């Protein structure tokens, strides 16, 4: 089977520093930070009080009018995916059902639903605590203790009948496929922070083998809620001194790094076969040429100090692309900002790229917006593609003081001009061992 | 030349037992695993019964290795035990020249069950003031209690990708690792995508399938609120009635099904015996409604056709369909309609059954367990029955292999899985012929 070329034609982002790829990119160029005291809930003094929240928005701006009634079954994670999908198809100028019904495209949808797939990464979607705790609290005995017997008899009726559907991880993809009429191959990857990279890789393969012509892929998640904050706080990776100056608190690969912060957001990417993109005259941002995945088998809850799976995933992506180290001009690590994870990731990149790392710039958005979970990787992917497309590298916040072992050359202060032929990004899950790398290439008509 | 993908190992943990052959024998004799729920007190729930995995011991499968996985969640334990069977049947425990970077994992694994007691304790505490009066949720009070009583390991083990993580460590699988969670279609999807990993040359061996349990208070709550579960509390052993006119919902089961998929030449080189070949896979979305299946079975039809096309087969080649067959009014009617659309005149002549009638619905793990039954049907030339079938439904008028297992020459099987929200996946396995 002749291999089909796959290109990036649309970028949709919902981030703490902006909705839509233009505002996201502008924020990176202008060094705006999305980490600040959180407003959506108050657990001050008990849980971390800083994170990255989306700016205010109206969901009705992103869906057809007829779909507004479905908003009541959307968790925050689903909403993020729906916003990203809107921005992605708009950016790609794809006339999907949504755009036609919203009057933003004329005529009929120009995407064949059967050839339009979705690969969307999702997290462990948190239940709405107000709703669930409130319902559980109705089922107590006279002594105030929870009673399962009362819950079964009457308490559970305080939950809306469709309650479960808000929290199934595949509902991100289901809402997106309904809104945009994507009836093709459909998958939901749930691999923590590696989800976006794996989902984009899966969509890439789906188009290459001819099962779809267009895929919306990436991921979305919100970790800005009491449940996720409490859970994360149980692990030692949250930045303990973030309260003082949030915009300085996440310092990936710095000698003084002290942990991660949680945020929310996502990215959905439009991938298209080159043939399909050409037939509709689409703007091509870049060509996706390599994907590689590997797994840390030393532990499911600690990074491998040697970073072997990181190295293997990177090498596989380079090999898959038929590329070589001297063509790679940009590195985009995942960069949690914790002592252990950054040390591990650094070793992995060193093994895979060696001296090349000293010669090329690097980019991370982690200082800008922390870790949003399943959607973080797709936001990184979007930033990487914009850098390649615009020949411009934005600064990476809080990287002025690199760890002596760090060979990444992040940009400080002002953006720089940087011609980039190929760029490489890595995503890996904090728990579970998954690592995945994606390699994009400047688009050339003939190759 | 295309790389061919064969099944060289399989294992399962099901409500009917914990090893391939004894469960298969019990299925063929039409046994039912449904009983009153014992994992928690469900006596006042709308549904009081389920199909639980009983008398399970991880150590029986992993020996001393079980200790390091002890804190993992119930679904991960099921996955590890099923994988141990599959790995051993495949002879991989004796393989010496395995390249670990070419061994991957693709699971349709569910989330680990919520640690319910501390969760409700914090919830109740957060919704009361110091005087003990009920209030709206106070997140400060909630968080104080949560920090005091939540357990870090328990929380971590809930993550959907942790079963993959445990398997990767146990089997040193350094290749690609994915977890998909497309609801009830997840493990069918996982097996299909794992097949592609091997075809594309990204792995020689894939550990694939799924594991799940939703038999816990919030799982049953969620499905009861959706009115998806049977509430036949007075006759629960016959509550799972796929395709029967009196069906009133599905019965929750739990467990795992794991298969070892392997590139044919890799299997041959080490002398492994292929149990079947995976030849077709289709995945689609209804793109219709969150709550309902498309009334024409649009997505199900497209998934079955995509699977047939990818296999280069026609409906005439299919000898048996392992149905999604949940026992809900809507699924069984629309699945029947979809089969008729794809199979035309052949629909009346192809045997169809739902083993969910015996073991309930294993949710994310259902598709993997059902695909294993297809491999066994091919191996033994016998089809498992749909039990509890007594009342024909005019909307479900095909051959569901009612109540009795049936001998049949089985060469090629189609296995359907459909998930909430309109996720459709179909797999085709066939007798291995060199």
Image (cartoon, coloured by chain):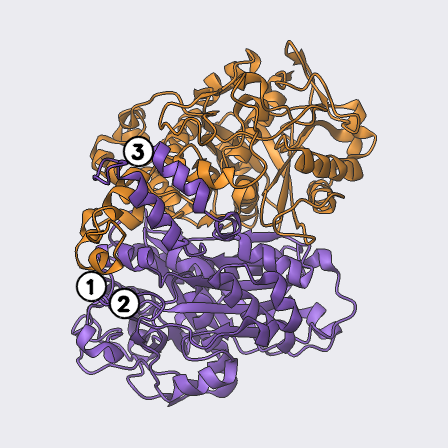
Which mark is on residue B138? 3
Q: Chain of mark 1?
A: B
The image quarter in which residue B29 lies = bottom left
Residue B146: percent from the left, percent from the top? Answer: 41, 42
Q: Colour of chain B?
A: purple
Q: What residue do we see at 29% from left, 64% from top?
A: B338
The correct choice, above or below, for B80 with respect to A76 in the image is: below
Helix, strand or loop status at disc 3: loop
In this view, the residue farthest toward the front is: B131
Using the rendered image of the protein, determine whether residue B409 is visible from the camera's viewpoint.
no
Residue A327: percent from the left, percent from the top? Answer: 76, 30
Q: Chain of mark 2?
A: B
Residue A426: percent from the left, percent from the top? Answer: 64, 37
Who comes first in sequence, dot 3 or dot 2?
Answer: 3
Residue A314: percent from the left, percent from the top? Answer: 70, 41
Which mark is on residue B46? 1
Q: How far apart are the alpha carbons under marks 3 and 2? A: 37 Å
The correct choice, above or below, for B342 with respect to A248 in the image is: below
Kindly identify which residue carries mark 2.
Answer: B250
Who comes first in sequence, dot 2 or dot 1?
Answer: 1
The image quarter in which residue A237 lies = top right
The correct choice, above or below, for B428 with respect to B160 in the image is: below
Label 2: how many Cα within 10 Å (few below 14, some 14–19, many 20+): many
Have a look at marks 2 and 1 and say if they share a chain: yes
Q: What residue do we see at 57% from left, 47% from top?
A: A205
Q: Which chain is orange?
A: A
Q: What residue do we see at 54% from left, 78% from top?
A: B431
Q: Chain of mark 3?
A: B
Label 3: how many Cα within 10 Å (few below 14, some 14–19, many 20+): some
Q: What residue do we see at 67% from left, 50% from top?
A: A296
């Amino acid at each position: 089977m002749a291999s089909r070329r796959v290109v990036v034609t649309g970028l949709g982002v919902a981030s703490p520093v902006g909705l839509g790829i233009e505002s996201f990119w502008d924020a990176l160029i202008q060094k705006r930070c999305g980490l600040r005291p959180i407003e959506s809930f108050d657990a001050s003094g008990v849980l971390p009080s800083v994170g990255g929240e989306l700016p205010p928005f109206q969901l009705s701006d992103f869906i057809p009018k007829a779909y507004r009634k479905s908003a009541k079954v959307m968790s925050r994670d689903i909403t993020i995916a729906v916003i990203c999908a809107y921005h992605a198809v708009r950016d790609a100028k794809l006339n999907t059902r949504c755009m036609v019904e919203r009057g933003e495209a004329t005529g009929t949808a120009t995407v064949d639903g059967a050839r339009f797939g979705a690969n969307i990464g999702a997290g462990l979607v948190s239940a709405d605590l107000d709703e669930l705790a409130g319902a559980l609290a109705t089922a107590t005995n006279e002594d105030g203790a929870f009673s399962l017997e009362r819950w079964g008899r009457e308490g559970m009726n305080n939950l809306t009948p469709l309650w479960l559907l808000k929290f199934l991880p595949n509902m991100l993809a289901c809402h997106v496929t309904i809104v945009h009429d994507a009836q093709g191959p459909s998958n939901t990857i749930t691999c923590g922070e590696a989800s976006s990279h794996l989902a984009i890789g899966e969509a890439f393969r789906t188009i290459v083998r001819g099962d779809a012509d267009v895929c919306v892929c990436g991921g979305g998640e919100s970790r800005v809620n009491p449940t996720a904050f409490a859970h994360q706080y149980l692990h030692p990776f949250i930045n303990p001194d973030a309260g003082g100056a949030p915009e300085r608190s996440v310092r990936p690969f710095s000698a003084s790094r002290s942990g991660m912060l949680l945020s929310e957001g996502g990215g959905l990417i439009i991938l298209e076969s080159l043939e399909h993109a050409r037939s509709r005259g689409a703007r091509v941002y870049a060509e996706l040429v390599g994907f590689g995945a590997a797994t840390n088998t030393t532990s499911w809850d600690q990074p491998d100090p040697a970073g072997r799976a990181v190295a293997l995933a990177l090498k596989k992506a380079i090999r898959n692309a038929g590329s070589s180290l001297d063509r790679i001009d940009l590195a985009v690590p995942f960069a949690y900002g914790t002592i252990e994870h950054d040390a591990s990731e650094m070793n992995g990149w060193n093994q895979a790229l060696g001296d090349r790392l000293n010669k090329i710039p690097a980019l991370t958005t982690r200082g800008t917006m922390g870790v949003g979970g399943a959607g973080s990787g797709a936001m990184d992917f979007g930033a990487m593609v914009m850098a390649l497309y615009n020949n411009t590298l934005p600064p990476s916040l809080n990287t002025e003081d690199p760890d002596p072992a760090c060979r990444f050359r992040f940009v400080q202060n002002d953006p720089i001009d940087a011609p980039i032929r190929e760029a490489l990004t890595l995503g890996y899950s904090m728990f579970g061992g998954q690592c995945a790398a994606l390699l994009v290439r400047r688009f050339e008509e003939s190759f | 030349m295309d790389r061919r993908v064969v099944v060289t190992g399989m294992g399962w943990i099901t409500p009917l037992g914990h090893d391939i052959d004894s469960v298969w024998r019990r299925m063929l004799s039409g046994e039912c695993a449904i009983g009153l729920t014992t994992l928690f007190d469900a006596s006042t729930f709308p549904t009081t019964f389920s199909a639980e995995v009983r008398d399970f011991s991880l150590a029986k499968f992993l020996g001393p290795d079980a200790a390091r996985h002890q804190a993992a969640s119930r679904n991960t334990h099921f996955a590890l035990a099923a994988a141990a069977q599959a790995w051993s049947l495949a002879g991989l425990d004796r393989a010496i020249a395995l390249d670990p970077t070419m061994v991957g994992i693709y699971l349709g694994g569910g989330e680990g069950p919520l640690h319910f007691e501390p969760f409700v304790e914090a919830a109740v505490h957060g919704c009361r003031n110091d005087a003990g009066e009920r209030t709206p949720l106070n997140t400060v009070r909630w968080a104080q209690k949560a920090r005091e009583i939540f357990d870090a390991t328990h929380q971590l083990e809930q993550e959907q990708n942790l079963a993959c993580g445990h398997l990767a460590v146990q089997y040193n699988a350094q290749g690609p690792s994915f977890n998909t969670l497309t609801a009830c279609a997840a493990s069918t999807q996982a097996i299909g995508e794992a097949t592609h990993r091997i075809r594309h040359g990204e792995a020689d061996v894939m550990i694939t399938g799924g594991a799940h349990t939703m038999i816990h208070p919030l799982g049953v709550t969620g499905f009861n609120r959706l009115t998806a579960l049977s509430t036949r509390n007075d006759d629960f052993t016959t509550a799972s009635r796929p395709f029967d006119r009196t069906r009133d919902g599905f019965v929750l089961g739990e467990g795992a099904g794991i298969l070892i998929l392997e590139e044919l030449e890799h299997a041959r080189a080490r002398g492994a015996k292929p149990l079947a070949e995976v030849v077709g896979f289709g995945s689609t979305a209804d793109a219709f409604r969150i709550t309902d299946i498309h009334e024409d079975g649009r997505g199900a039809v497209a998934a079955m056709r995509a699977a047939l096309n990818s296999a280069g087969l026609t409906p005439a080649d299919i000898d048996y369909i392992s149905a999604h067959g949940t026992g809900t009014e809507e699924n069984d009617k629309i699945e029947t309609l979809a089969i008729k659309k794809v199979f035309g005149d052949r629909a009346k002549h192809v045997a169809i059954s739902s083993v969910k009638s015996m073991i309930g619905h294993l949710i994310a793990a259902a598709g993997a367990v059902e695909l294993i039954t297809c491999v066994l049907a091919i191996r033994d030339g016998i089809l498992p029955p749909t039990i509890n079938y007594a009342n024909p439904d005019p909307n479900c008028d095909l051959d569901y292999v009612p109540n009795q297992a049936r001998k049949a020459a089985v060469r090629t099987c189609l296995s359907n899985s459909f998930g909430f929200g309109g996720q459709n996946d179909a797999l085709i396995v066939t007798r291995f012929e060199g």
